[in-house]
Amino acid sequence: MKFPGHICGLLMLAGLYAPAQAEEYKLSAWVEDMQATRWEAGAVLLGVTGLGFSSWDWGSSKTFRWKPEGWFAADTYLGGSDKLGHAYTSYAVTNVLYDHLAMQGRPPQRAMLSAVLTTQAIMTYMEVLDGYSGKYGFSPEDLLSNLLGSGFAYVRATRPGMRELVDFRLEYEVPGYKGLQFRSNYLLTLKLSGVDALRDTPLRFVELQAGYNTRGYIRAEQDDGYARSRHVFVGVGLNVSELLLGRRASREALSRNNGRLFFEHVQVPYTATRSAREL
C-alpha cells in the first residue's frame, strides 16, 4: 500500500519512513485494524460529529470556506492554544488506537501506522466539515497540527525508550468563574524514570515540564476581568504514574495498562511547581 501523500511526508520528515517499509504495509492490514478498533474510533467519530453540529456550526455555510487562522500570535483565535488542542487530540487518539492494537498482538510498526491512518481519517473528516461552518472554516493550520500530533505519537511509540521518557499532556484547571468552564494547559514532560542512570534512584519520581497556555480568549474569562495573554512555563513535577504503578512490565493487566495510558496523557492538577512568563 502507498501512504497518502501528507502521511508519507510527515513520516519522512520524522525520519521514520522509507519506501520499502510502505510496501510491507497492506491496505488489508489497515482494514483489519480498523475493524478491531471500530468501537474506539466510532466513539471518537460520534463525539466529533455531535460537537460539530451542536457547537461548531457545521452546516451553517452552504459553500466550502477556506480560512487560514495563523499560529500563536496574540491576535489569533485562542492565541494558538487551539492548535495545541488539535495536536493533542490527534496524539491521544492515535495512542489509544495503537495501544488497543498492540494489546491484541499487532507488531508495533503496523499498529502505529494503522492508528495514524485511522486518526487522520477522522480528523480530516472534522476539518472538511469545519469548511461548511460559518463560524470556523477549513484551517490548514489545524490540518498540520493534526498531522504533527499523530507524528509525535508515531515517533514516541516506535523509537526505543521514548515512551518511557517523554509525554505530551493536557491539564485542566477549574478557574472559579460561573458556568462549566475549564482552562487548558498543554505540556511536554521529561520523565527522569526513563533515564537509565536515574531509573533506580528517588529521582525516578521526578519529571521536568515545559508548556503553554492562554488566558482571556474566551467570553467567560473576559467577563471575569481577564485580559488576553499568552504564557510559557517550566516546572518540576511528580511522576504520578511511577508513584502509583511503578515500572512498566513486559505484560500487564488491562486495568494497569489503561491507568498508565491515562497518566501519560492527563496531568494531575497540583502535582507540579512552575514558573511562567507572559509573551
Image: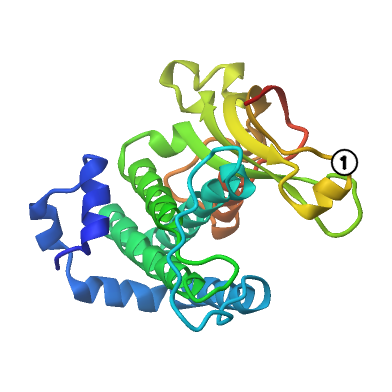
The amino acid marked with disc number 1 is Gly
Left or right position of 185 against 48: right
Q: Quadrant of residue 73?
A: top right
The image's colour scheme reads rainbow
State the quadrant of the C terminus.
top right
Where residue 60 sits in the image (x, y, percent)?
Answer: 59, 80
Q: Quadrant of the N terminus?
A: bottom left
Q: Is residue 105 visible?
A: no
Q: Position of residue 36 (x, y in %)?
A: 39, 75
Query: In this figure, which residue is indicated by the disc labeled 1?
Result: 225
Q: Secondary structure at mark 1?
A: loop
Name which residue lies at 60% across and 34% down: 212
* Left or right, residue 147 beside residue 5: right
| Mark 1 neighbour density, 10 Å: few (under 14) some (14–19) many (20 or more) | few
Q: As displayed, is residue 197 above or below residue 60? A: above
Image spot of residue 111 (x, y percent): 32, 60
50 or 95, which lies in front? 50
